Image (cartoon, rainbow, N blue to C red):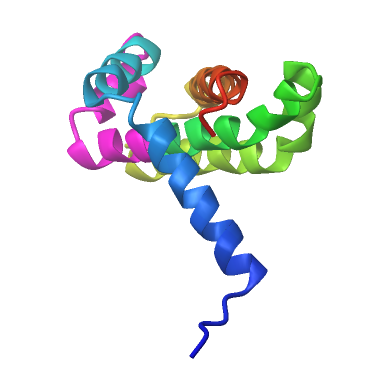
Amino acid sequence: MNVVTTFNEKKREKQIKYERSLLRELSIQRLQARVKDCFGSSRLASGLLMNSGIEEACYDVAIEAYLLGGRYSRFGYFGESLEMARKRCREEEKHLVDTLYNFFLFWGNGDEGIAGESLYYMCEQYVDGWWREGFQKGEKRHKLKMH
């Protein structure tokens, strides 16, 4: 008896395998250090980082941004610049930034007022940094034929 598999199942299996290989290069220590580097300088964010739920949300968004960059790195391998590849996933990246920003706002004490805009820019920089790192690591994996 033959097992029937669909194209979508095979595609998803291949994507999961690739994401696992990308995640092997990521460590918790790097995640923690980047959260402290990016949000430690802000009074609002550093006060909220004492809550472990917020720190875990930062890790989740970082991993998603890293994997998003890794997925779009194949376009870089085929000759697109980093910025051209980035335009392809603008909406997904904006969703990650908005998710992190709204999470900070939800757990904030209502002190966001003026600092809200700078907090949003910090979230953008955080997601951007992880996206770029995932893109570069993925591009390297494609060049080495490790995908």
Q: Nearer the viewer, residue 108 or 98?
A: 98
The reply, left or right, for residue 112 in relation to residue 118 is left
Q: Nearer the viewer, residue 53 or 85?
A: 85
Residue 59, image x and y in percent?
A: 33, 34
Residue 107 horizontal/vertical position (percent): 32, 42
Q: Is residue 117 visible?
A: no
Q: Residue at x 81, y 21 (%)?
A: 80
Residue range highlighted in magenta: 40-60
- Whether residue 28 sits left or right of residue 62 in the image: it is left
Instruction: Check residue 44 for magenta coloring.
Output: yes
At horizontal 55% and vertical 40% (from top left) the residue drawn is 96
In the rendered view, tell whether residue 16 sits above or below residue 55.
below
Q: Main secondary structure of the magenta part?
A: helix
Residue placed at 56% from the left, 67% from the top? 9
Q: Nearer the viewer, residue 25 or 84?
A: 25
Residue 84 visible in the current orientation: yes
| Above/below status of 93 relative to 86 | below
Could you tell whether 78 is left or right of 59 in the image? Answer: right
Q: Quadrant of residue 85?
A: top right
Residue 106 belongs to the span the image colors magenta? no
